[in-house]
Image (cartoon, grey):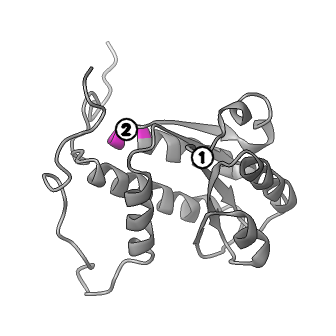
Amino acid sequence: MRSRSCGSPRRFARASGSSENGARQPRRPQLESLAREYQTARDFLFLGRGLHYPVALEGALKLKEISYIHAEGYPAGEMKHGPIALVDEKLPVVVLAPHDGWREKTLSNLREVKSRDGIAIVVATRSDDAVSAIADHVLVIPETIPELQPILSVIPLQMLAYHVALRRGCDVDQPRNLAKSVTVE
């Protein structure tokens, strides 16, 4: 059986520890640590509510495209209709949990994940005791108006996918079986 790995992690690693102006990228060590911890995961589940459901889909898609790990994006409100059966101690579940009107329902989803020994990775707009008490990992992002929050929320998901792919030795610049453009005949 062929290995699901991409190759040597050093083969495609980039040597950029800082940006052009010399400033460190925010949360890079935290994302690299998460990538190191979960690079061998066989599956990921991404959950989001409202405007963050498409962000969950994008996070799952990016992880699939460049690291070749099976990942699914799902509306958090539908978690009990299927994906909950997959949650166990080996499944990383990425939950988008901005401080918004869905907060209590999202915290309920987190509790469901943890009650099944799932691994909860939370992208939140505020670091607080309620999230920290439940989650295994919390990535705090800046808070903005609700209509723009998905733009900020997708960044750590894309960076996580990038770092996981690098750790697995995948070529992030030329993922296999992906076309640069789609042509219609």
Residue 41 position, x and y percent, is 45, 43
Q: Earlier in the sequence, mark 1 or mark 2?
A: 1
Amino acid identity at mark 1: Ala
Query: Residue at coordinates 27% horizontally, 27% vertically from top-left?
Result: 177
**Image x and y of residue 123, in percent:** 61, 63
Q: Quadrant of the N terminus?
A: top left
Q: Is residue 37 above or below residue 42?
A: below
Q: Main secondary structure of the magenta part?
A: helix
Residue drawn at (25%, 24%), measured in percent from left and top?
2
Measure how far apart labels 1 and 2 are at the Cα level.
14 Å
Question: Residue 71 in magenta?
Answer: no
The magenta stretch is 64-68
Q: Which residue is mark 2?
A: 65
Which residue lies at the image location 13% right of the left edge and 52% below the top edge? 11
Please, what secondary structure does the residue beneath circle 2 have? helix
Q: Classify 10 Å Cα crowding around label 2: few (below 14), some (14-19), many (20 and above).
A: many
Q: Is residue 100 left or right of residue 97?
A: right
